Amino acid sequence: MGLARSEDGGGQTPTFSNDVLRLEITGPDQEHLSVIDVPGIFKNTTPGHTSKADIALVRNMVLGYMRNPRSVMLAVIPANVDVATQEILELAKDVDPEGDRTLGVLTKPDLVDKGTEWRIIDLIEGRARKMQLGWHVVRNPGQRDLSDASLDRINLELAFFRSASPWNNISEDKVGIESLRERLKEVLSSLVRREFPKVQHEITKRLDTAHKALEAMGPERNSPAAQMSFLTELGTKFQRIVTLALDAKYGQDEIFDAQPALRIAPAVLARMEVFAADMMQGGHMYSFIPQERQDTVQQVEQADLSFEDDTPPDHRQDAFDSRKEDDVDDLAEVLRPKKSLSPCNKEGIQTWLQGIYTSSRGFELGTFDGSVLATTMKKQSSKWIEISLGFVSDVIVIVHRFITAALHSICSDRHVRDTLFATLLDGLLDRYRLAIRHVHFLLTVERDGIPITVNQFFKKNLQKRRQARLVSAMEGVSISDCRHGRVVKLKDALQHYPMSNTNYTIQDIHDILAAYYKVACKRFADNICQQATDHFLLNGADTPLRFFSPVFVGRLSTEELERIAGEAPKARRKRMDLCKEIANLTAAREIVLKG
């Protein structure tokens, strides 16, 4: 046990140890109890034998046993020393203030100085240092007695207490080892009866814990059939959690309170709202000209611009991140890196459109080539790439954390959990890549294809912008009419307002782009949420959440079943220990119930 021997010469090896040397004595006449003999507390070191570390170790060891509320303390003190100097009595009083489980035992009465016996008698009779359970005195054989081969310990002690004065005047139930045995039985019985309800509760609690631990391990998995059955049950539990989580029925299982990462629906919806805000408020490179300020180029350049006429002003005053969730090591090759995106340019759209138009115009009269709209749309939506890929990457992280938390909740066996997760990982990564690939597909359709829409809101928005431009132009020549409000004379309405063909075309490009961008942005955001997110990651038939299932288990080979679900030697030992503990606790509970 790493303890010092006499020949060690007082090295660094300790003299005492917390290790317990257990001797078990069984037989029909043996008492059902445990006796723990702890070393005596000492305060001074002995060079070459004990150290300060030994002092602290012994003291902590003794106090540890004394604090056990179901133990009876025998405070053993030599009768030939002053009881008032014995620290053990104060320690016993600290841990047992009522004295219900502290019994004083005096030894070596034959060594008490003549004339001082009355002090010991006062202790035993309760006239001094009174204890709740009282004092008892025993006489053990001395060194001379032990050398006698015919020694009868019981008779030797009885003869002493019957003949030696004043010990022969003490009541027989307070002297001798046999009466101490009976007294100890009484104290133990009283303590056990008092502790019965607590013991019964503790046994029941430990039995329940052991049953749950064994249940969590599942049935024995020593054959492919047993291994498949075990994994199939795990797959069924996993899919139940997935269904409840996606339906947001969190009140039907306490597991959602213990694992916040399993509340996947609110997490994804919250991220969708942030994604929509990023797209609508910061997805465009240039802010469009408000409808109420479309009369002159000068007003265009000075306007406090917003994204669209029927939404709140642009709130993206500062740069924002494309990603909101932290990365996961398993997904490094799939996730889009976080990028900081600049806010929209509040001014300059007129100059930008003019540059695009003048560098790509042909010999068209009064119109412009269709490629101009595609070019401007691609530039205006360039931030869609990082915003959408960052959003889907975040949803992948949320899904991956859900899967990890769900596996941890349904499988307590770390070996099975880790091996199963490693087996699932490649399939999960393939499904994550499908979602990312679909985002690229939607980006290609929206940004590289021809601008197309049959949405009536495009025509409605374009008409509203053109009407707003006409109203803005007429405001300068309108007059107040009491009956009809502000009106414009016909001759003023027909008056020619000089504007170059270039400026007119640029205004037209702006209005068409603004009307189309509004429709395309909402369409793209919806498609990302519905297709790339919901279909490929959440509710589709072959999403990462639906990958681990009984169907997946049914496709595993015998080798894979053994590798994932086969019990390791450590798990087998744990199962045996749990079964043994359950058997012992069950037997103990029956004994307690019988009283």
Image (cartoon, helix red, strand yellow):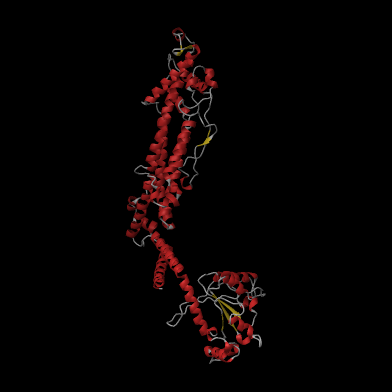
Left or right? Give the position of 494 relative to 301: left
Q: Quadrant of the N terminus?
A: bottom right
Residue 133 at x, y percent in the picture: 54, 77
Give the quarter of the image for residue 13. bottom right
Left or right? Give the position of 484 relative to 83: left
Residue 204 at x, y percent in the picture: 42, 65
Asked if one can make out residue 79 in the rendered structure from this viewpoint, the answer is no
Give the quarter of the image for residue 273. top left
Give above or below for 482 relative to 450: above
Residue 125 at x, y percent in the picture: 58, 82
**Residue drawn at x 44%, y 27% as measured from the top left:** 517
**Residue drawn at x 60%, y 74% as measured from the top left:** 89
Q: Quadrant of the C terminus?
A: bottom left
- Residue nearer the viewer, 301 or 546: 301
- Residue nearer the viewer, 171 or 225: 171
- Residue nearer the viewer, 538 or 368: 538
**Residue drawn at x 36%, y 42% as measured from the top left:** 539
Give above or below for 130 relative to 418: below
Give above or below for 257 relative to 437: below
- Residue nearer the viewer, 329 or 300: 300
Asked if one can make out residue 314 in the rendered structure from this viewpoint, the answer is yes
Q: How many marks?
A: 0
Residue 487 at x, y percent in the picture: 45, 12
